[in-house]
Image (spheres, rainbow, N blue to C red):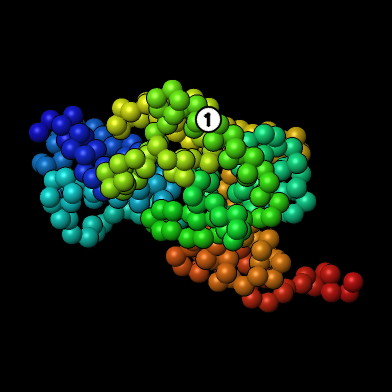
Amino acid sequence: MSDSKLLDQVRREMRIRHYSLRTEKTYLQWIKRYIFLHGKRHPQDMGEPELTSFLSWLASERNVASSTQNQALSALLFLYKNVLGVELEWLDGIVRAKRPKRLPVVLTKDETGAVLSRMIGTNKLLAHLLYGTGMRISEALRLRVLDVDFSYRQITIRSGKGNKDRITILPDRLVKPLKHQLEHAKVLHDNDIEDGFGSVYLPHALDRKYPNAHREWRWQYVFPSKNRSVDPVSGVIRRHHLHDKNLQRALRKAAFEARLTKRITTHTLRHSFATHLIENGYDIRTVQELLGHKDVKTTQIYTHVLNRGGRGVRSPLDAGK
């Protein structure tokens, strides 16, 4: 089997299992690097020693983060198990990349307001949505019309991290702008239908189960792209959702204009959402559910951001005030 045929088979196996296109590209990149590092030998002719060597090289020579090393490991385990049919034992002797203990960057409420007030257009709505709901940027961009429930003031997040569904809050302040956004999206969809298009990507073979669903309004994206494009997987001309790069750039620009020195990304708004909820007295379990964390320990990091750790701690320097 040639390398090109091997990569085609990896793509096929990942699409059967409904992996995202981004994960597909990432896995393929790691598999290529693994093959090239070992002189373009076929993975079928390699095994645990070569895999251990590659992962150790990433940690010791490339100084990658722990999460990056784990990503590479996941890609190669997928290759061996699902494509080559080889079950690898637990890999001993790997030089593990160290996981640095870093606290998330969090904005104060005033800083958050300063940034959000400088956003405009669709980016403004998206930024408010991330801060107001705690969603990840990918989750917000993948929202469909049927996911927004104005009656119950809630948003359903489907196939979030870990392929889990969850429900988060819909802030009252976002009801009106979200309805305006849906009106805009509806005009685009109606125009697409009139032009003979109007199809949207449906996950998990829903397009086969419901043959006409891909053209129905309720399945369309809340934040559709301005232009139609060719689906890289199916080749069908569709209207995808907006790209996250536009929001990232707009957010950095707003932070610069607000003269903030903190490194701000879209994920900073999610961190700020969680921290401010805890600051307002909401219990950690509620915040965990809204964020979709599997383990409450992940959510507890926000108590450390507040320097509370279960009890209020006051500096002795301030004790006399």
Q: Amino acid at mark 1?
A: Leu
Q: Is residue 180 in view?
A: yes
Instruction: Name the quadrant containing residue 93.
Output: bottom left
Q: Residue furthest front?
A: 194
Q: From the top left corner, tell me how far across and down residue 208 is, in percent.
A: 27, 44
Give the answer, above or below, for where 122 lies relative to 145.
Answer: above
Q: Residue at x 51, y 46 (%)?
A: 145
Q: Residue at x 67, y 43 (%)?
A: 177
Mark 1 burial class by Cα count in 10 Å: few <14, some 14-19, many 20+:
some
Q: SS for tag 1? A: helix
Residue, disc 1: 188
Give the answer, above or below, for where 147 lies relative to 261.
Answer: below
Q: Residue furthest bottom?
A: 311
Q: Residue at x 44, y 29 (%)?
A: 193
Q: Residue furthest right?
A: 321
Q: Is residue 286 left or right of residue 32?
A: right
Q: From the top left corner, tell me how far across and down residue 296 is, in percent.
A: 50, 69
- In this rendered view, identify the residue nearer to me: 221 or 41: 221
Q: Is residue 275 left or right of residue 17?
A: right
- In this rendered view, identify the residue nearer to me: 78 or 99: 78
- In this rendered view, identify the residue nearer to me: 39 or 250: 250
Q: Quadrant of the C terminus?
A: bottom right
Q: Residue at x 14, y 36 (%)?
A: 42
- In this rendered view, identify the residue nearer to me: 96 or 181: 181
Q: From the top left corner, tell me how far across and down residue 165 is, in percent.
A: 43, 58
Instruction: Name the quadrant containing residue 203.
Output: top left
Instruction: Name the quadrant containing residue 34.
Output: top left
Q: Is residue 98 in view?
A: no
Q: Is residue 44 left or right of residue 70?
A: left
